[in-house]
Image (cartoon, helix red, strand yellow):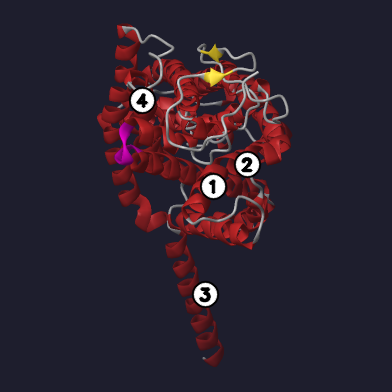
Amino acid sequence: MAERANTKSDSPSDALVLQDGSTSKTGGFQEPANVKGLSYPMAAFFLVAQMAGAGFLALPKAVSNAGWTGLFMLGLFAASVAFSGTRLSRAWIMMMERWPQYRGDVRQPYMDMAERALGPHGRRLSYFGVFVTLGGGTTVYIILIAQFIRNSIPDNTLSTCALVIIVAVCLTPMTWAGTPKDFWQPTVLAVISTVVAVVVIIIQILVDRESYPPPYYTTPTVGTFALGFGAIVFSFSGTSIFPTIQNDMNNKGDFWKSVLIGFVVIGSLYVPVAGVAYGIIGSAVKSNILLSVTQGWVVETAIALEVINLIGTFLVSFNPVALAFEDMLNIPNKFGWQRVALRSGMVVCEVMLCLAIPDFSLILNLVGGSATACATFVLPPLIYIKLHGMTGEWDPPIWNLPVYEKAYLYAIAGVGVIGGIAATISATWAIIEQSFTQSCFTMFNLDLVLNATEVVVTNTTAVL
């Protein structure tokens, strides 16, 4: 059983010292027996909850934007992100074996890896990737929850804009918990809800396939293909939270098992729902697949389950961003008024973004093409390659890095750079085109004008 080193210096350590005096060179980091944390199946639940929040809802439309090539891209990206995730896990094990200070409670493991591997600019780039990905993701979840609730209200008496505010007020107290292991029960329920929702959607589409108009399939353009790329990338936006979940495990060396289990589950959810929905509905599929199927009690149950899933995913995604801000502001890592004030203020900022851009697909495409591509496709391969090639007072690297593996990692990073730039440009243009017609602020102002006009007309009529 490995013992933690007492030193907190920045000196490298060649290996973990075991109780019998031998050293560990296998890359397996085992916490002391009295350390409580997540098991690898529970960590896999967190990975699925993180990635399957809003991702699968937008996948049929993403495939529609990219054409049938989108299904191939979906499978390829799943395999690539899973492979990259296992390498990111190895990179964190390297960090703990080489530098003892990372064997304890680390609040920003992803950023620390980026800085060790790529220097201060790497840390800044990781901040951008993590903050915008997770912050943009939680913003998307608020909008989706509001849309689902509005869809369930008779006569749509409340607008999505008003429900965004109500949803945010209800979610805010839930953000005051500490780390993901402080609220693992909702996460397990979220995964179960997603699985049930996907099954319901597929069955409902297959049952009602005769009621849909004959599907048509438009030829993707460069712009729509880029938007599809961004949405598909966003559906794998969990990589930046991998180290945070791994750091909460009782045996961090088992995280690769969590990654494999998580991506098997994710693949079994993503590919069928995207393929069936696009194949039967075609290019007429909406941005939110749940709003494209025939409404009934079964679909309403699926919507209720998905709301539960989105709430759990919101909490898991919100936490790393909040922890990073708390660390920068030297806020104690415990419940208190400072945590409450900061996290509540963060939710307020997200609400303002929701009201400015109430279309979740616009935010999703932009975040996926920019920050998610950076945090999921570009940084993890570069971090692992750089850390693996470092020399120091420790022994040679534990894992050999074959040429084909290095080439594959560089290819993943290259796809992230090229595709991310194209998707960001397309998504930004789409937002500019629609921002003046869909903003809640514009709608609020329009409502005020209409109400004032109605009062003037009423009073004028009464006088006449």
Mark closest to the chain's N terminus, 4 or 3 = 4
Going by the numbered disc 4, the residue's amino acid type is Ala
Going by the numbered disc 3, the residue's amino acid type is Asn
Q: Closer to the camera: disc 4 or disc 3? A: 4
Above-or-below relation of 100 to 458: above
Tag on residue 451? 3
Mark closest to the chain's N terminus, 2 or 4 = 4
Going by the numbered disc 1, the residue's amino acid type is Leu
Tag on residue 66? 4
Q: Which of the pair 210/2 is nearer the observer? A: 2
Q: Are marks 1 and 3 in contact (CB under 8 Å)?
A: no
Q: Which of the pair 223/185 is nearer the observer? A: 185
Q: Is residue 119 magenta?
A: yes
According to the picture, the residue beneath numbered tag 1 turns out to be: 323
Residue 406 drawn at (x, y percent): 32, 13
* Residue count near mark 1 (Cα–Cα under 10 Å), binned few <14, some 14–19, many ≥20: many
